[in-house]
Amino acid sequence: MKLSQRLQYIMEQIPAGSRLADIGSDHGLLPVAAVRSGRVPQAVAGEVNDGPLRAAQKQVAEAGLTDRIAVRKGDGLAVIKANEVDVITIAGMGGALIASILEQGKDKLVSVKQLVLQPNVGEDILRRWLIEHQWVLTSEHIMEEDGKIYEILTAVPDSVSPLKQDELYQPWKLPDSSLVLTQDLLMQLGPLLVKAPNEIFFYKWKLEIRKLEDVLAQVARSDQESAQHKREQLRKQIEQLEEVLACLPKDRQ
């Protein structure tokens, strides 16, 4: 069984020997690959929908791993017991939904040592949740696969992180610029991604600028007073992002 590059990268973030819970496991590919490879001894695959649940059950049964992977139906972290797992992976959902899942199940996170999260959108919402609940990013990875851009966030509890939140989100003055990246901007861009931008990072934000320019063009057609304020906001946002991209180290593109 060959994983997609995205799932392969997520699996590689899981410390060897961990007990894994993959929430929203879909076809159960990640837990099956993680157990089969010897990376984890046991896993839980959680699914709330019947179709993916049956697909995961079939995948686990065909791999001969029903004694090591528990496929459970339930909403979010309701599928795991307290102290049952060390690592939780949640991939392929919006950042707001992932944050909601973590919030609703935060009593299950007390013994969890690592989160590996891949939001499809709303990365800033998820970063804010992590800050507010004392989870510190240890790595951020941005990649493209099949025409889609993914960000993968790995976080550990503040109590065991060598890097603290105030260091991670300390306002940063861009080289050769008067622009300071505030905490809000760092949450939007990724505090670790922006310090080591790769080609996909630049590509993503150039696309975002184009989207904002399209919205600006639409708003510009309106004569309403509220539209003028919106135009000013959009222009400022576009200028800010363009300056960020212009001032980041180009040799990393």
Image (cartoon, grey):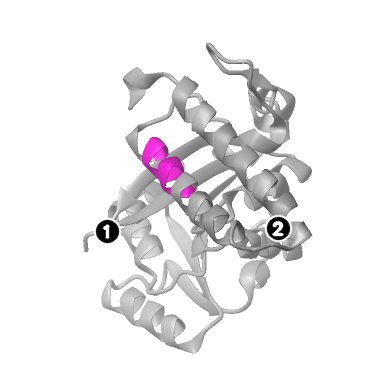
Seen at 50% across and 33% down, the residue is 242
Residue drawn 74% across the image and 63% down it: 224
Tell me the residue that label 2 is attached to: 227
**Which quadrant of the view contains residue 105?**
bottom right
Question: In the orientation shown, which residue stands out farthest toward the front?
Answer: 223
Where, by quadrant of the figure, is residue 204 drawn?
Answer: top left
Relative to 103, 196 lies left or right: left
Cα–Cα gap, marks 1 and 2 = 37 Å
Tell me the magenta residue range: 201-208
**For the stretch drawn in magenta, what is the main secondary structure?**
helix
Q: Position of residue 60 (x, y in %)?
A: 35, 74
Residue occupying the point 42% across, 18% down: 249
Say whether residue 8 is left or right of residue 171.
left
Q: Is residue 218 depicted above or below 110 in this figure? A: below
Using the image, tell me which numbered label, if any, was put on residue 220.
Answer: none
Residue 135 sits inside the magenta stretch: no
In this orientation, which residue lies closer to the viewer: 71 or 213?
A: 213
Considering only order in the chain, which callout, 2 or 1, is on the residue closer to the N terminus?
A: 1
Residue 138 visible in the picture: no
Dot 2: what SS? helix
Q: Residues within 10 Å of mark 1 (few under 14, many from 20)?
A: few
Residue under numbered circle 1:
146
Which is more toward the observer, 150 or 204? Answer: 204
Residue type pointed to by label 2: Ala
Q: Quadrant of residue 221?
A: bottom right
